[in-house]
Image: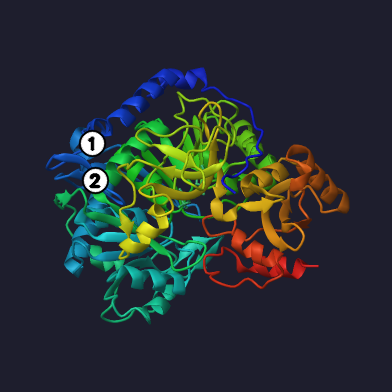
Amino acid sequence: MSSIKSVSTESRVFEPPAEFAAKAKIGSREAYDKLYAQSIEDPDAFWAERAEELHWFTKPTTISQWDPPFAKWFLGGTTNLAYNCLDRHVLAGNGDRTALIFEGEPGDTRTLTYAELLAEVCKLSNGLLDSGVKKGDRVIIYMGMVPEAAIAMLACARIGAIHSVIFGGFAAEAVRDRVLDAGATTILTQDGAWRRGKVVPLKAQVDQACESCPGVVRTIVLRRTNNDITMKEGRDLEWAAVLDGASAEHEAPALDAEHPLFILYTSGTTGKPKGVLHTTGGYMVYAHTTTKYVFDMRPDDVYWCTADVGWVTGHSYIVYGPLANGTQVLMYEGAPNHPGPDRFWEMIAKHKVTIFYTAPTAIRAFIKWGDEHVTKHDLSSLRLLGTVGEPINPEAWIWYRDMIGGGRCPIVDTWWQTETGGIMMTPIPGAVAAKPGSCTLPFFGISPKVLRDDGTEADTNEGGYLVIDKPWPAMMRTIWGDDQRFKETYFSRFEGKYFTGDGARYDEDGYFWVMGRVDDVVNVAGHRLGTAELESCLVAHEAVAEAAVVARPDELKGQALVAFVTLKSSAKPSPELNAALSEQVAREIGKFARPDSIRFADALPKTRSGKIMRRLLRELAAGQTPTGDVTTLEDISVLASLRSDES
Ligand code: WTA
């Protein structure tokens, strides 16, 4: 099989609202086309100009160097990302502007201006240096969503320590693996984090991880939940003690553009996690530029991205991109349904949020919880919506637009990856018309291609492998400590081109439709189908909240389809519904794609970042007991209940 068959038939088009376009930084399709053409014809000139918008201690002498698979950007330049996010605004006279608005899960709030945030970052920078942390050291940040997590990232970036944020939902063994792989010396953590009114005991997990991590010589512990913890003499320091007496002034050092900035681990479906390495200059320029244009960002926006700082979205679009743009960033500590399912909408109304960026998995949960939680709040402050993380099914897209955006806000469906560092494909909101379920067109400087198995380019509407065939500033530099694996994973499938691992097609307008991970492709009756489209068809049924489709081996057909379906709270499983769903797939896609079995479930197994773990479902569908790594699973009980459902 050379390509992946696309069965999606979505054809609605939504032009940028005129009122939005009139004020937008890029306000017409012509303006986008012109800038995109420039960025592809002369990328060095384009990126040199973008780099000029930021501060460099020494200007770069060479803009890019591409020796596949290794890229370098802004060679010879020195800069400091924290300086660009903080000092630059303060020196420009904007120190009194709001930088961070924090809301804790219990309802406590705290606001930091740019000047205050700078002072906090300087204090921690001095504290880290005094405790013995040096430039180039690896520092783990294993915290909840508190301002100190952002302060910790910025302080590391400032002194040139390489941070690796580990999502606070991970347990001790996941922490241990990452600490060991990174060779970290220092862990910044907290006693506990709030989640649905309960304490997640972070420090206790660190203690357990450290039993097998002799390289960790210090931990610095923030008090947040005041649960009992043990402090190990000679290793564990109180956060407050580290800051005590630390000066609020610190001169940001000039760091080489290619100085490592952070390592972020992505869990592949199998094998040990990959430490994706990003470096300073290219990442900075890309995060700044994408944030500016994709979110059309202004200093008076109140911007809320609901991701966790433990994911790349939290790095690029909670901390670095928005702060580099000098905007007001809302940061929320807890769960979306605590104390009630309207927490997010209540917060949007309270803080007058203007830009809201979340994930399809969250949107589907909101739909499931019911519209009444949304409609009781005033969401009229919103002007722009975004999604990231998975293909969004058109039904969820329309609901998001109508129910949350009041029909007036453009939606940016942003496709990108931990590896890409920043948004790669997205509508520019004032310029590019949206189609529900499509991430539309490439960002400036990005050259996506869809290839067949043999490396030739797929035709219009022919699904294939999504690659990027030109380097861009924020591309990952390597897998930490493993250049060989970097090359094999990303650059060997198609020689010299970055392989994303995703399947995609582009339509007659050149719009890209991502069909999900190629590992998830199923082969039915000789057709290779992306599961995302099958799932989207099921979710289009009014009773369905979420669906995951996997294949199991079948003696006759080779593969048979199994659909796992969760229903909206208003619906109940029944043989009639089962038949109706099967009929819907037959009608919309074709009889060949009819699932052999539809299984109703209360919930689907997901990673902690909300992606459905199809690998586990494949094993269940094949009647096996899930093996392999389940440490990234969000809620292990989901697996148990799915198994007991087997009949
Ligand atoms: C998927 C998250 C379709 C895709 C920033 C990608 C998407 C993987 C989209 C990366 C989107 C992300 N449309 N699919 N808008 N955004 N994906 O590393 O499969 O957590 O390869 O980065 O998520 O996930 P990661």
Point out the residue furthest to the left here.
Answer: 58
Position of 209 relative to 120 (above/below) = below
Image spot of residue 505 (x, y percent): 54, 38
User: Mark 2 highlights which residue?
Assistant: 281
Does label 1 point to a residue whose CB lies under 8 Å from ligand 1?
Answer: no
Instruction: Identify residue for label 1.
Output: 51
Quarter of the view holding residue 294: top left
Q: Nearer the viewer, residue 640 or 73?
A: 73
- Identify residue type, mark 1: Ala
Q: Residue shown at 64%/47% (left/top)?
A: 529
Check contact, mark 2 vs mark 1: CB within 8 A.
yes
Work out whether 341 lies above or below 426.
Answer: below
> Is residue 65 found left or right of 416 in the rendered image?
left
Q: Quadrant where the C terminus lies?
A: bottom right
Residue appearing at x 68%, y 71% in the figure: 624
First of labels 2, 1 by sequence position:
1
Residue nearest the viewer, comparing 624 with 169: 624
Return the x and y of residue 452 as percentages of the image width and height. Answer: 51, 44
Image quadrant in which you'd find residue 489: bottom left
- The residue shown at (79%, 48%) is 571
Q: Is residue 320 above or below residue 211?
A: above
Q: Is residue 451 left or right of residue 166?
A: right
